[in-house]
Image: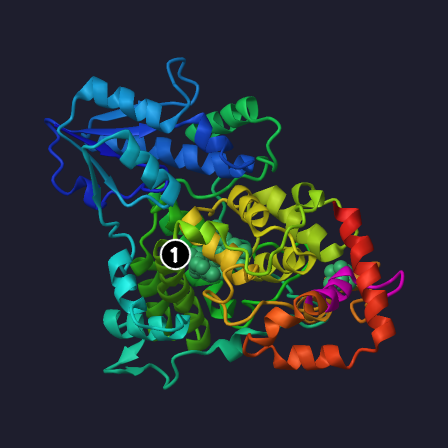
């Protein structure tokens, strides 16, 4: 018999793990372990979404006639460790082969290899591109850039293509994806579909509150999809009600508006409840029906067909060394308000507050508010990574790490991004209404009213000037630095040190 391992982010009925499954003989094995729940200081919603989706998947498999050996977290016999549980399952079932699809985390993959010599790792067909194909793409290239990979993917999967030309004539409508809301705000926003906890989710919520009471985040608002059917409804809801405005407002932010025109499908995709091909096809069809403009549809497809596949490729190409990268030698601790949202900086208060409320923040909040701030402070990228891995319902290391360590912290020295995403408070002022209700002024870099982002931005450039001289596209920012008087530079450095001291 074969033992088929299904991990928490592998809830895919068409997974290659089931290819030759024999219902008379084979057994599916799934386990909830304490060690995974506390590997980082997980948000309660992240633990809940994984456990609830796993239990729903277990029940679906059983309905379809699969034998499932499932160990719940509070089972008295649960050994609490993934490898110990696996060894015990192997002793119980005596399988000829232990089959699993590629895990989403290097550490877990190594742990599985250590636990059994009978392991057969199969390709994860959820992704459009394989790890090996990305290696081929990367071979011989001095520099990896999304744009080349994305064009290859568009051609290969014939998405938004007219013969061999991109629909509309351009590959990329990024320039049209940078709108902000007018002063009056975004107006009436379409409320996204909600999934109120069913009996299984309610049971998991109670379990999480009991076992992880001190973990960050709230569960009162938990309404994420936990089944394939719900994930499909979430996608339909986005395509019908929000896709048309996704493009223009992709980078915009607004106080107490966590969803805006975003899709909220990342957790469904990453748990494998939703197929990325289905998401891209649904967007393309909306364009063909004339229901959404090309810039919105291309922007959305670029995130899934482009970025999502690209970051996975980078992760597996660069691990395990990637985890230890720290190109800017950043060593500050993570400010403690990242776990509470308790800060006078309105942008951080809002982005962290909603993260704790929902386990969600959209891309620009992650990149240009929380990510930008830790970059400017010079927080140790590993601590930043641990926070991002812990607090989002969609966090799995293959996608979280390159986005955090590479894109937002520039710790990989330019593998993910051609230059650091460094900006002053003026960027946040342009893209949101946060600064209007903040006690700080984004135009000021010194003095009582100085916006910490602006002070720390100049300090970041001063501290890293030598390193950044070799980084293309930083010229203009460094030229602006040269224009600052020495006395002001000293004042900025002093204020920046005081700020950093206060966050330690
Ligand atoms: C520091 C940082 C950490 C991040 N951590 C994660 C993470 O742990 N898990 C995760 O799925 N995404 C992560 N992202 C990418 C992105 O922020 C989220 O995918 C997005 O905010 C999820 O919300 P949504 O489903 O509403 O996405 P939308 O804005 O509606 O985008 C549609 C889809 O595109 C994909 N996508 C968009 N941007 C990216 C990207 N940069 N990389 C990979 N896929 C992308 C996602 O699957 C997303 O669901 C991170 C980004 C940053 C800057
Ligand atoms: S002034 Fe600075 S700290 Fe305040 S909201 Fe704007 S960018 Fe954030």
Q: Quarter holding the C terminus? A: top right
Q: Per the image, is 449 magenta?
A: yes
- What residue lies at 51% left-to-right and 45% top-to-bottom? 389
Which residue lies under the disc numbered 1? 318
The figure's colour scheme reads rainbow
Q: Per the image, is 447 magenta?
A: yes
Question: Is residue 120 visible in this depiction of the protein?
Answer: yes
Residue 75 position in % (x across, y down)? 40, 16
Q: Residue furthest front?
A: 466
Q: Residue furthest bottom?
A: 169
Task: Return the residue nearer the eye: 101 or 350.
Answer: 101
In this picture, which residue range is highlighted in magenta?
A: 446-460
- What residue lies at 36% left-to-right and 38% top-to-bottom? 108
Prevailing SS of the magenta stretch: helix
Disc 1: residue Cβ within 8 A of ligand 1's nearest atom? no
Q: Quadrant of ligand 2?
A: bottom right
- What residue lies at 45% left-to-right and 38% top-to-bottom? 49
Task: Return the residue nearer the eye: 226 or 453.
Answer: 453
Question: Is residue 433 visible in this depiction of the protein?
Answer: no
Q: Quarter holding the N terminus? A: top left
């Amino acid at each position: 018999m074969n033992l088929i391992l299904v991990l928490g982010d592998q809830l895919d009925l068409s997974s290659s793990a089931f290819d030759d499954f024999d219902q008379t003989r084979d057994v599916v094995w799934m386990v909830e372990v304490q060690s995974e729940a506390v590997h980082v200081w997980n948000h309660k919603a992240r633990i809940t979404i994984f456990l609830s989706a796993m239990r729903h998947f277990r029940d679906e498999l059983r309905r379809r006639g699969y034998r499932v050996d499932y160990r719940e977290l509070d089972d008295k016999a649960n050994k609490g460790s993934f490898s110990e549980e696996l060894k015990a399952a192997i002793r119980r079932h005596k399988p000829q082969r232990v089959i699993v699809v590629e895990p989403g985390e290097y550490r877990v993959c190594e742990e599985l290899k250590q636990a059994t010599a009978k392991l057969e790792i199969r390709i994860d067909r959820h992704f459009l591109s394989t790890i090996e194909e990305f290696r081929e793409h990367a071979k011989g290239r001095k520099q990896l850039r999304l744009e080349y990979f994305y064009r290859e993917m568009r051609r290969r999967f014939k998405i938004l293509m007219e013969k061999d030309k991109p629909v509309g004539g351009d590959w990329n409508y990024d320039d049209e994806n940078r709108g902000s809301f007018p002063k009056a705000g975004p107006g009436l926003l379409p409320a996204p579909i909600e999934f109120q906890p069913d009996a299984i989710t309610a049971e998991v919520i109670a379990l999480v509150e009991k076992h992880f009471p001190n973990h960050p985040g709230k569960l009162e608002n938990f309404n994420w999809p936990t089944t394939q059917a719900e994930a499909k409804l979430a996608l339909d809801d986005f395509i019908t009600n929000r896709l048309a405005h996704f493009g223009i407002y992709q980078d915009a932010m607004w106080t107490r508006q966590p969803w805006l025109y975003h899709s909220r499908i990342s957790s469904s995709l990453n748990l494998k409840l939703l197929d990325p091909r289905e998401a891209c096809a649904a967007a393309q069809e909306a364009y063909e029906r004339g229901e959404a403009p090309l810039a919105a549809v291309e922007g959305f497809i670029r995130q899934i067909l482009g970025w999502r596949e690209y970051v996975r490729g980078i992760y597996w190409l660069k691990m395990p060394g990637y985890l230890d990268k720290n190109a800017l030698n950043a060593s500050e601790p993570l400010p403690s308000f990242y776990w509470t949202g308790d800060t006078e900086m309105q942008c951080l208060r809002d982005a962290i507050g909603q993260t704790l409320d929902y386990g969600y923040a959209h891309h620009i909040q992650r990149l240009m508010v929380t990510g930008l701030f830790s970059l400017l402070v010079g927080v140790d990228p590993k601590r930043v990574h641990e926070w991002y891995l812990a607090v989002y319902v969609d966090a799995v290391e293959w996608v979280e790490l390159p986005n955090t360590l590479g894109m937002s912290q520039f710790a990989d020295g330019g593998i993910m991004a051609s230059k650091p995403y460094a900006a002053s408070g003026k960027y946040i002022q342009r893209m949101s209404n946060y600064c209007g209700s903040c006690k700080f002024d984004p135009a000021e870099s010194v003095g009582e009213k100085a916006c910490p982002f602006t002070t720390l931005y100049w300090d970041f450039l001063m501290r890293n000037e030598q390193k950044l001289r070799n980084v293309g596209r930083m010229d203009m920012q460094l030229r602006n630095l040269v224009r600052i008087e020495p006395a002001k530079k000293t004042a900025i450095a002093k204020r920046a040190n005081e700020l950093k001291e206060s966050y330690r």
